[in-house]
Structures are given as C-alpha cells and as structure tokens.
Amino acid sequence: MRRAITVVTCILSGAALSLAGARGGAQPAAIVPSPAASVTVDESKPPAPPKPAKMLPGWNALWTELPKASADLRIALAEIERAEAATRIAWAAVNPTINATGTYTYSSRPQFVAGAIATGGIIQAQLSASQTLINLRAFHQIGTQKMVEDIARLDVVEVRRRLGLGLARAAASISAAARLTEGNRTSLSLAIERLALTRKRLAAGVGDTRDLVRAQQDVATARAVIAPSDESLLQAEEGLAVLLGTPGSVGLNVDLEGLEGEVRAFCGDAGAADKERLDVTIAKKRIELAERNVDDITLKFVPTLTAQASAGMVGRAFEGPFNQLWSVSVVLAIPLYDGGVRYGEKRDRVALVEEARARALQVQIAAMVERAQARRALDVALAAQKSAKEARDLAAEADRLAQAAYGSGVGTNFDLIDAGRRLRESETQLVLRDLDVARARLALPFVEGTCVGVAKKGDS
C-alpha cells in the first residue's frame, strides 16, 4: 500500500514539474522587446572630403614645385653662391692690387714744392700696385675653396634626394588616404543597403527587432570611421604642403599605381644598388677638406714674397711745375713667432679631422643600415599585401554568400552583418598594406641613392 502511494506521489510531482516547465517555456516570446522610439541611425549620404587648397596632377608637377617652395633646397642653392663668393675672395690674395689716390691741399703758409716756393693749393697724385710672387698658403686656399664649392653642389643633390624621399612618402600617404576615404564611403553605402534588406525581411515577418538594431549598429560603425579618415587625408595633404613650404594643403590627383609608375619613369635607370650613396661621398670629402685646413695652418710658417711699385707726382695746383716720383720694392715676410697662435690653430684643425672621420663612419654605417632596412621593408610589405589580398577576397566571397543566403531566407542577420564587418575590415587592411608596398617601392631608389632622375634635374 505504501509503495502504491509513493508511486502516485512521484507521478503527480513529475506532472507538476512538466506543467511548470510548459508554462515557463512560453515566456521567451516576450524576451525581445520592441526597440525604443529614440534609437535611430543616420542614413544620409556623408559629405565629400574637404578639397585641398591646391591640387597637383602628379609626381612631375609635384617635383616642379619643389625648387620654388622648399626652404631646404633654397638654402642649399644659396650655399653654392656663398662658396663661389669665397673662392673669388681667395683669388684676391694672389691677384694684383692697384690703387690710385689724389690729394688737394691748401695752405696759407709758403711751402717748398717741386723745387720752388709755392703758396695756395697743392695737388698730389699717386698710383700704387702690389703683386704676390710667392704665397703658398694663398694658392692652397684657392684649392680648398674649390673643394667647398664641389661639396656645396653635391649637397644640393643630396638635399634633393632627401626631399624626394619625403615627397614620395607624403604622396603615397595622400593617395592611400584618398583611397581609404572612398572605401569607407562605399562600406557605408553597403551597410545602408543591408539595413534596408533587414527592414524588408522584418516587414515580411522574418526575424525580430534584434536584427534591425544589429543592422543599425553596422551603419553607425561604418559612418564613425568616415570623419577620422577625412581628417587623416587632410593631415597628409597638409604634411605635403609643409614639405613644399606652401600654406594650406596640397593634394594629388593620382592613385598609388599611377604614382609608382610616374616615380619609376622619373628616376629612370636606377643603376648599381651597391654604389656609394651621396651623403657618404660628401662625408668623405669633408674629411679631405678638414685635412686641407690642417695644411692651411702649416703653410702659415712659410715665408711670402711680394712685389710693390708706386708712381706719383706733386706740384702747385693748376700751375705746376710737377715733380714725378716712382719706386719699386720687393718685400720678403718671414713669420718667426706669433706667441703660439699657429700651434694652437693646428691642434684645433687636427681635432676637426678626427671629428670628420667619426661623422663619416657614422654616416656610412647609417646608410648601410637604411639600405638593408629599405630592401627588407619591400619584401615584408609584399608578403603582407599578398596575405591581406587573400583575406579580402575571402571576405568578399563570404559577404556575397551571406547576402545570397539572407536574401533567400536561409542565412541569419548576424551572418550578414558579421560578413559585412569582416569585409570592411579586410578592405581597410588591404589599403594599409598597399600603402606599405607603395611607400617601400617609392622610397627604395631614394634610400639607396640610385634615383638618377634627382641628379639629372637642373639645380639652378
């Protein structure tokens, strides 16, 4: 009897639990509430990116603007003028000097002039000339200044190389930023289309309000990156304007592929990649210049020989007679002791030679490292670009399949939004990897110093 009662109790308890579960299972239908009336998303078309103050058609136009605007290049060109002026000054030490003087003197007291007593005005005229015969230091200084001229001319080409490197990177950044802003607007348009498709499915009774909110979030996320990308484009254009010394912003009407082609045509035959870079050549020439400055102090100990001649006349003003005088002399100057100035100057110049050697070694090592890094950067960028392109293609295919499945009622809204988000992210990554490749390719000839287009352009 007790066993029967126990069995009946268990059966009733199980039935009660089943009924409670059935009542609880009907509740999830009320879990998804209707969206709040204040939850909206901007579905309007975004404004176009701000236009730059100045638009250039491509690389050649950009390079044409360089001599007119770059402060560094103008300074380098002015240094050539200064070096040539210093050479002309050095020549003055060995060229003849000729001077003429004329004097009119009035005296109220009688004076003995030209063999007679004269009163009133007296005229005196003199012509003098001087010519250096032996002055080894002066001739050595001419050669030193010519070397300074050569260094100044090489420095102009080196400045062009550095500016070309900066321009190439800035131009690539502008092209990539413009492409990114365009891609972000395309992604927003696709997100709005997915939102419209979600609304159609909801109107047909498929899905719930979570799908609508998810699609609205996708639109808001796509719109959120547009303003920062526009600002990045503007900053890239302003950076280019700074390089050119132009107020405002400077834009380029060329894509990455076109920019690479223009720079490749501009540089022409790159030549040997292992050729010594120009900044290394300049550093070595500065060592030679420092050594010549040591010799310049040494030549201060050498005697100099100078010839001087003068001719003149003196007599009563406007009456005469006039006495004529002339003289010729040769002056030998022997430097004996100056208190130790030359010894101190020589020690200073020797120390400058050591500094020049240290700087040259530093420049040479830096050039080697920069070349190696530039070559590796291109290889790494190409590998990353390949992976990013594969990821973008897969994301595009996944997005296409998600749209097809969602349109046929098979796929879910989550799959659709997630595929669109992944496609948007992969597109952004591909643009960034394309930028890395373009920067590496554009920078390589300038970093290696083999861009002959820079050296062939006129410097004046």
Image (spheres, rainbow, N blue to C red):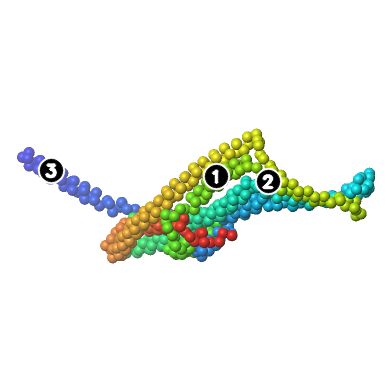
Quadrant of the drawing holding the C terminus: bottom right
x and y, in percent, of residue 48 in the image: 49, 62
Quarter of the image where one finds residue 413 = bottom left
**Which residue has dot 2 on it?**
305
Residue type, numbered disc 2: Leu
Residue 299 lies left or right of residue 178; in this view the side is right
- Mark 3: secondary structure: helix
Above or below 46: residue 86: above
Q: Residue furthest left?
A: 1
**Which residue has dot 3 on it?**
10
Residue type, numbered disc 1: Glu
Q: Nearer the viewer, mark 3 or mark 2?
A: 2
Q: Residues within 10 Å of mark 3 (few under 14, many from 20)?
A: few
Q: Nearer the viewer, residue 243 or 294?
A: 294
Q: Nearer the viewer, residue 226 or 216?
A: 226
x and y, in percent, of residue 370 in the image: 43, 50
Evaluate whether residue 230 shows in this view.
no
Could you tell me which residue is drawn at 65 percent across and 34 percent down?
339
